[in-house]
Image (cartoon, rainbow, N blue to C red):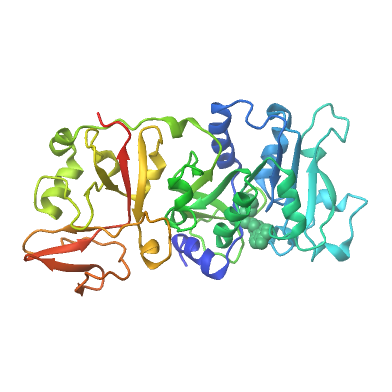
Amino acid sequence: MSDNSNQCAAKTAKKDEFYTQYSDIEAEMNAYVEYNPDVFRNKTILLPCDDPEWSNFTKYFAANFERFGLKKLISTSYAQGAANKQLTLFEMNSPLFDEALHETRGKLFTLTRDTDGSGSIDTDDIEFSGYLEGDGDFRSLEVTRLRDEADIIITNPPFSLFREFLAWILAAKKKFIIIGDMNAISDLHVFPHIMRNEIWMGNAFNKTMTFAMADSYDSSIEERDSLGRKLGKVPAICWYTNVELYKRHTRLVLMTMRENLKYNKALVKKCNEDFGRLEYPHYDNYDAIEVPYVDAIPSDYDGVMGVPMSFVGSYNPEQFEIVGTVSAKQNEGSLNTGKSYKAYIGYRQDGTLNGRTGSTFGKCPVIVKDDGKHPYYVKDGVRVQATYPRIFIKHRKPQ
Ligand SMILES: C[S@@+](CC[C@H](N)C(=O)[O-])C[C@H]1O[C@@H](n2cnc3c(N)ncnc32)[C@H](O)[C@@H]1O
């Protein structure tokens, strides 16, 4: 299996053993600290999928405990995870160590004070606070209680349980910064929160990230990390959060519609080759224009625009309003917000496809044909084709 398929496989085969690099955590947290230097001050942080020996989240926050002015760091480790197979020094050197419980129980680690009298609070002061009653599943009552005690939950959660993990955090109305993949954006349990500005994208967006991973996972990378773990790349990684950062308040600098149709080379090519006319196509069944690239959003259009899902990486709610979405997943299902649309673009008269590929769109009453890739119908001799998954947006103040 290739690195690229690791991500999909994570969901189907529950391949969850991907360990985040210290530099990726540091770069991401810098964005929140830059916006608010006191973002973590006097806060209790819970890292609920993090063994201190293996998790760089634990190492990072322990190393920065004093700089951030943390109140308490809580790390829990999951008994069934690969990290648990090894005994940590924190556990082994503790009077609470019990070999019989090591294999089956989750573990609790805390950091609150200078335990070794070194004069500073750091990684060496992490305390093994004992075994959990169960295996450390974040959904258990005991880890849920730790969630309730915490102010912020930060981690790279198991990919296969991302949706459940996010719901677990949101149920307690907690602040969070967590890693996920791009697919989750259009998930019908995630997108409505993005639309309502309850959650947003963090700093690193749609990035191919290198993770340490279980030995049985395939990877094209030869080298190993300092703990001897295999490294592998996973594409389309991003961070989901409800903690403020500057990126979310940065305005996209855009050209007018006229300027785009003159100077935006990719758009001009797309219009000429795919749409058959040098203009932004209007959807056949929904009052909005198709904008195939984020940098082609016209600054002066005051109606609704359909933009690629990657728009959320540049979404500034002071500049735009999200009014709905159309995505493969939503067409399948039951998003009862009344805000999902099925949008179709009119294509040129000869009905050619021009090599467009992309998601197909479930059931639709007007589809008369399907070429295996795209549902479409013919109206007045014109081929009308489903668009890619799109987010529908409006300028708050068109210029
Ligand atoms: C993607 S890895 C990330 C590990 C660590 N947070 C990091 O970034 O280095 C997710 C971890 O969650 C653990 N895990 C899987 N299911 C879990 C569950 N139900 N509750 C808690 N942890 C779980 C896995 O064993 C795995 O170690």
Residue drawn at x 87%, y 66% as measured from the top left? 100
Q: Quadrant of ligand 1?
A: bottom right
Indicate left or right for 161 with 114 as reference.
left
Image side of residue 318 versus residue 278, left or right: right
Residue occupying image coordinates x 16% and y 33%: 259
Q: Work out whether residue 236 can be spotted.
A: no
In this rendering, would 53 be left or right of 272? right
In the rendered view, would you say 360 is above or below 278?
Answer: below
Q: Position of residue 311 (x, y in %)?
A: 36, 44
Residue reaching furthest right?
95
**What residue lies at 60% left-to-right and 54% top-to-bottom?**
157
Q: Residue at x 35, y 59 (%)?
A: 327
Give the quadrant of residue 160: bottom right
What is the x, y in percent for residue 384?
Answer: 16, 63
Report how many numbered discs are placed on residues in the image: 0
Coordinates of residue 338 in the picture (x, y in percent)? 38, 56
Decide which of 32, 52 is in the foreground and name it: 32
Above or below — where is 339 with respect to 26? Answer: below
Foreground of the two, 220 or 284? 284
Residue 356 against residue 195 in the figure, above or below: below
Can residue 60 be seen? yes
Displayed quadrant of residue 302 = top left
User: In what quadrant of the picture does the C terminus appear?
Assistant: top left
Instruction: Give how far across and how far down residue 42 sits, in percent.
Output: 72, 31
